[in-house]
Image (cartoon, rainbow, N blue to C red):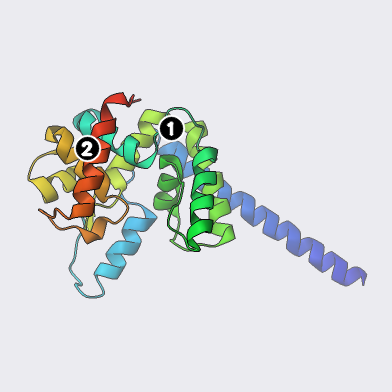
Amino acid sequence: MKFIARTVGYSMLAALIGLVLVQFWFFAHIWYWVDHNPRATAFMDARLERLREKRPRMELEFRWVPYQKISPNLKRAIVVAEDAKFLEHEGFDWEGIQKAYERNRQKGKVVAGGSTISQQLAKNLFLSGDRTWWRKAQEAAITVMLETVMTKRRILEIYLNVIEWGDGVFGAEAAARHHFGVSASELTAAQGAQLAAMVPSPRRYRPGAETPYLMKRTEIILSRMGAVALP
């Protein structure tokens, strides 16, 4: 019995040490990215791998641009569409999470997420798309690290540069050129609102797509952009 207890104790200690090392690995990357730009994210790598199954020479459309070269129109639109309380919370919008839970319960399926921009960035930077309790717990831990180490401006800058806006299209610059033929700095309010409306289902829309849902969602975002403050 002593041997078994000792073995279990060592196993638990090893698991704890491993968990601490993994968290340190995440934290070290986040600390580095405070003033260095990520070359890619876990989500980008996963998408590229899948795209190359059919097109081996496929490359992502991606070009990093600094915060000041992204139109304020797009910034405001994204905050309106994805996280209206971005400047107020510390990584988690508990009211939004509660509303999403109630809506999903009423519908009997997942129709709303309630994730903040910080949570979405945590997932895109490091994690898979699996809906497991472990992944959600890790996402929460990374979110706390992001909010602790980075400014809101830096979180938004990275987010705008790495989210998906089409099949293999990542970041504001690639999205602006892919959908509208302009740079990210030249996006109008209507264009910014339309890009923000695409975020939940980015691969659904091709350049020039103007579905009734997309146009309605664009109008709603556009009408709320004037009240949004930016970091």
Quadrant position of the C terminus in the picture: top left
Which residue is under mark 2? 65
Q: Secondary structure at mark 2?
A: loop
Q: Nearer the viewer, residue 77 or 214?
A: 214
Q: Residue 168, percent across and down?
A: 22, 59
Which of the 4 quarters of the picture holds residue 144? Answer: top right
Q: Amino acid at mark 1?
A: Lys
Question: At 36% across and 29% down in the image, what residue appears?
Answer: 153
Q: Nearer the viewer, residue 120 or 93?
A: 93
Residue 85 numbered mark, or none: 1
In this rendering, the count of numbered labels is 2
Question: At 24% across and 70% down in the image, what residue appears?
Answer: 52
Q: Residues within 10 Å of mark 2 (few under 14, many from 20)?
A: many
Residue 35 in sight: no
Horizontal relation, residue 86 to residue 226: left or right: right
Question: At 29% across and 50% down in the image, what residue appears?
Answer: 199
